[in-house]
Image (cartoon, helix red, strand yellow):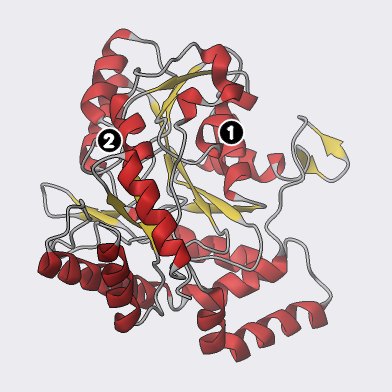
Amino acid sequence: MIPLFDLTRQYERIRGEILNAVDKVISSGRVILGPNVESLEKEIANFVGVGYGVGVASGSDALLIALRAMGVGKGDTVVTTPYTFFATASAPYRLNARVMFIDVEKDTFNMDLDQLEWVLKKEKVKAVIPVHLFGRTMDLEALSFLRERYNVKILEDCAQSIGSEWKFSNGEIKRSGSVGDAAVFSFFPTKNLGTYGDGGMIVTNDEEIAQKSRFLRVHGAKKKYFHDEVGYNSRLDEIHAAILKVKFKYLEKWIEERVRVARSYQKYFEEKKLPVEYPKVEERGYKYHVFHQYVILFEDEITRDRVKEGLSRRGVQTAIYYPLPLHLQVCFKDLGYKEGDFPVAESLSKRSLALPMFPEMKDEEIEEVVNTLELFL
């Protein structure tokens, strides 16, 4: 069997370091908001290129808390994409904000910034949540321009893109998460930097957003037992932080290995000239794509589903991200959207398939995936 993602191979490489780190935390007796959380917050913030990091219990909580810290509330308009994980839209929805969707680009799967600007010209928008989907960075320079020109708050969803970069026209290279008012990361086990459970982080250059996020994560208390607001119980566990500190040392290496896997897929697809669209590794001199997922597109839904079933029978795991765009989800029916409103997102949901992708994947496994895929095309 070839898994979609394999945590066990990674664990074999760093097992001793992980066990040692966990043992130190438990032996210290300090297991909530201790030195590992504080250290990791600084490391991630420095890595992204911002001033503050706030560890929380999950990437989903990070979205919710960051939006509140940015002042988003009832009736505010928040713009995001319908082609993303559910939490991106559920966070503003839970705050009783008005969620507005914008379609994505067919080549990058990321928010169409031309459509965003059109909306910003005619609508009063409080915040935008752009998503660097599957590990591919959005145009950070264009995003910065829109933020400044229209005075709109930007919350970057970097759950899948830690370490990805964008080169500005002046030659400066910045990482995803560094240009918004704040950004969020997920440390879910399958992420490029993941722990063995849930975890997340908010990063920002805004001290006020950081401070508010810190007390919202502990029930809204700046001082223990004294609550200025009703917050959440959403702390990044000390054990998870210790695990992430070990893994963080290897992040850049693992990104390089993911790019290697993507390059191998590309080689086999080019050789076989299969009728699928696949992401290409472009030699840009910076990491514009960190390949959290390797997603290909088929001609239609029938072909996609037939190939997926065939791969499964042959022991190749795949996944569909995402089978139903958010504007068509039953729980968002009250937003008033209908089928046909976002044709690119709807097309992608019917044609996309994620192939196995993880740093330890062997070249012969990649070749077997493509060969098996060819059988059912």
Residue 222 appears in the figure: yes
**Which amino acid is tagged 2?**
Leu
The percent position of residue 231, horizontal first and vertical second, equals: 74, 35
Residue found farthest to the top: 122
Label 1 residue SS: helix
Where 185 falls versus 333 (above or below)?
A: below
Q: Nearer the viewer, residue 71 or 374?
A: 374
Where 283 falls versus 339 (above or below)?
A: below
The percent position of residue 144, horizontal first and vertical second, equals: 27, 36
Residue visible at 64% across and 73% down in the picture: 242
Residue visible at 71% across and 53% down in the picture: 235
Instruction: Name the quadrant containing residue 355.
Output: bottom left
User: Local crowd at mark 1 within 10 Å, few (<14), some, or many (≥20)?
Assistant: many
User: Local crowd at mark 2 within 10 Å, few (<14), some, or many (≥20)?
Assistant: many
Which dot marks residue 5?
none
Identify the mark nearer the N-term, 2 or 1.
Answer: 1
Q: Which residue is mark 1?
A: 69
**In-image side of 331 versus 31 (left or right):** left
Where 277 falls versus 38 (above or below)?
A: above
**In-image side of 235 versus 342 (left or right):** right
**In-image side of 375 versus 64 (left or right):** left
Label 2 residue SS: helix
The percent position of residue 290, horizontal first and vertical second, equals: 32, 62
Q: Quadrant of the C terminus?
A: bottom left
Residue found farthest to the right: 225
The percent position of residue 75, horizontal first and vertical second, equals: 56, 12
Residue visible at 33% across and 70% down in the picture: 369
**Which amino acid is tagged 1?**
Ala
Q: Which residue is mark 2?
A: 143
